[in-house]
Image (spheres, helix red, strand yellow):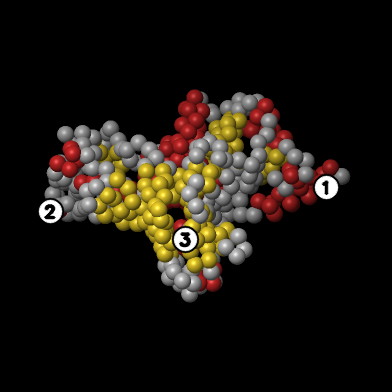
Amino acid sequence: MANTISLMSNVIRNVVSKNRIRYKGERFDLDLTYIYDNIIAMGYPSPDKLERMYRNCQEDVLKFLDEKHGDHYKIYNLCLERIYDSNKFHGRVAIFPFEDHNPPTIELIQKFCKDVDSWLKEDVLNVVAVHCKAGKGRTGTMICAYLLYSGLQKSADEALAWYDEKRTKDGKGVTIPSQRRYVQYFSNLVCSSVPYSKKMFKVCEIRFSESSLLKNLGTVKCKVFVLQDSTTENVKEHSSKKWTVDFQESCVLNINPSLSVAGDIKFEFEQKSSEKVIFHFWLNTFFVQNSSVCESDGTLLKCTYTLKKSEIDGVHKDRKHKSFSEDFKISILFEGEACFNDETKSKKQPKAALENQDISIFAYKEDEFHPNLRLAVETLIAQPCTNVGRLFSTFRRETWLRTTTESCPNEGNRLITLNFN
């Protein structure tokens, strides 16, 4: 009878796992995958007798980790909606909670990465086991962030692709657009010389690409949420009033007066008639300038941050374009203070210099100039040596800038540095 129940449970668990790769062997059948030898992604280890019929049984996970890794494992629980007794795993459980189907805050990612890195460096045998509920989206977001933090992967695309392949059968690991965007954000931050801060901007306008399909939604309410606490669920609706836009009349939502925001912000849109959330997305103001088309008069900075259909949570699922056109976009107009100090204004843009015989090194935009730093530039562009000294000012900073105290190799293993004194 016990064997029959166990077999039934395994069948159910395999169905619930869907596209996730399971660990099968040595008496174990678990929703668990090794992303690296010392990094595990897994589903929730449930203590509930009913739930463990279709999720990982906590006792089985404990046996597995004890047998495989002894005292050298630490569990990271990302669930906001549930916790369990950490003593079940010898007290080695760290909690970094955030809401399902949403990204973590930048501060939470930083704290998670530092904690994981500290544990793994403590002993070469140490491993981490990261989970949320399903052990896929939230888990993948945090693991990908650590792969970038540790240097195991060099770009957001590489980290996401690696995780997707290791964790799932169909390569669909982290699929929520905002979660993927935050992995890219963190990649940009790892490669930046500028420490993270909650930059202040004002939201002035939201524009929607015109579409006959959009008119079917009628009046839509817009809410903006600003995360107040980086480690809890205190997502607090902004104290300002809500806004509405009637898509039968206009595709522009004017935010008047403009709304001051900083840090992690969530835009949520719901149909007024049904009060059903149609789509939402998260942005972080620190990355607005480098992710937008910007213009400045030296005092005021105007940035238009545009999201394509595939970058909007909820809308990205409309693959047959029944509700939203294929070229549907949302553009958010931000205004902020232009951050140019006197020293930066007076500095001339540095000229390019040749560091290796078959690569050109380029200057960068004045508004991204950081004096007295040694910058290492990764994967710019291979050009004939005759291009030395040419100024390229249109490169997006996050695609090529990697700041460090030392030179670093690009993909061709050629050292390129710019030294500003």
Which residue is labeled 2 in the image? 386
Residue 232 location (% of width, % of height)? 56, 37
Residues at circles 3 and 2 in contact by the CB criterion of under 8 Å: no
At label 1, which amino acid type do we have?
Thr
Residue at left offset 27%, top offset 33%:
406
Asked if residue 112 lies left or right of residue 358, the reply is right
Q: Earlier in the sequence, mark 3 or mark 1?
A: 1
Q: Quadrant of the N terminus?
A: top right
At label 2, which amino acid type do we have?
Thr
Tell me the element at label 2: helix
Residues at circles 3 and 1 in contact by the CB criterion of under 8 Å: no
Residue 125 location (% of width, % of height)? 53, 28
Q: Earlier in the sequence, mark 3 or mark 2?
A: 3
Gap in Å between the C-alphas at discs 2 and 1?
A: 75 Å
Q: 254 and 118: which one is in front?
A: 254
Q: 108 and 386: which one is in front?
A: 108
- Say if residue 209 shows up in the picture: yes
Tell me the element at label 3: helix
- Foreground tag (3 vs 2): 3
Label 1 crowd (10 A; few <14 / some 14-19 / many >=20): few
At label 3, which amino acid type do we have?
Ser
- When the figure is inspected, residue 95 is found, relative to residue 414, above or below; the finding is above
Residue 239 location (% of width, % of height)? 50, 46
Residue 40 location (% of width, % of height)? 57, 39
Residues at circles 2 and 1 in contact by the CB criterion of under 8 Å: no
Mark number displayed over residue 4? 1
Q: Earlier in the sequence, mark 2 or mark 1?
A: 1
Residue at left offset 57%, top offset 45%:
99
